[in-house]
Image (cartoon, rainbow, N blue to C red):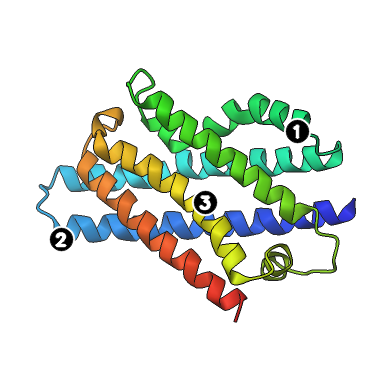
Amino acid sequence: MDYVERNYKILEDRMIEEMNTTLQFGRTLIDSELKAGVFNIIVKPLVKTFYDTWSNNAAKVGTLKQIKTTLDCAKQILQHGSSQELFDDLINNHFQEYIEGDQTYIHCRKKHENFDKLKEINKKLFIIQVKDAMKMMQIKQDINNYDELTKIVFKTKQDAYISLIKNIDYNDEAIKLIEKDPSILKLPTAKKIILKTIRKGFEKTKLRLIQYLDTIYN
């Protein structure tokens, strides 16, 4: 099943590229928010240091772990028959590994009343991501890049949009849950600016991904 390994690599490269773009944009947003807001000379360096440390270490390492867990699960299911029982077992067995790479798990209070809701949203997102990866990994046609792979899996831009929105909606649901009650966060400082940056970053990423479909289906 060489095509599975080929598609795995194409997906992995694309997901890592998206991770790096998102983290870099987050740094730009943090700088912009700090310049526009009224923050004292103590808070500004604390927020910058927190974000730099987080993005270069926890976020990058955690996201890479999530990427590998998602793609490995999809590959194992395809290689062993794609049964619903196998799918459910692998999801349940690897979800803890997946969520330990998630920043909501790392930076939220696990005893908070909304934490289980947040965890359940992440599980739904994990399931969708594994299913999408399975669809893309099983393509046998001769393709060379992510754009070609996407056009084979999703015949129209509308099909690709529907799949993308499912992922986006779960991310939005998780952010809204935290925005509604920021006490779930165990950040040391500047919760408001971090949340504002997360929301702006999400909206910008959503727009960028939707616009990217136009370049694929032109």
| Residue that carries the numbered disc 3 in the rendered image | 166
Query: Which residue position is annotated with label 2?
Result: 36
Q: Name the disc covering residue 101, or none.
A: none
Q: Locate residue 115, reporting x and y percent.
A: 38, 26
Q: Determine whether label 2 and label 3 are within 8 Å by CB.
A: no
Is 142 drawn above or below residue 78 in the view shown? below
Residue drawn at point x = 48 percent, y = 72 percent: 211
Indicate left or right for 210 with 151 as reference: left
Residue 169 visible somewhere in the drawing: yes
Q: Residue furthest bottom?
A: 218
Separation of residues labelled 3 and 1 (CA atoms)? 21 Å
Crowding around mark 3 (Cα neighbors within 10 Å: few <14, some 14 to 19, many 20+) is some
Residue 68 vertical position relative to residue 214 in the rendered view, above or below: above
Label 1 sits on what residue type?
A: Gln
Mark 2: which amino acid? Answer: Ala
SS class, disc 3: helix
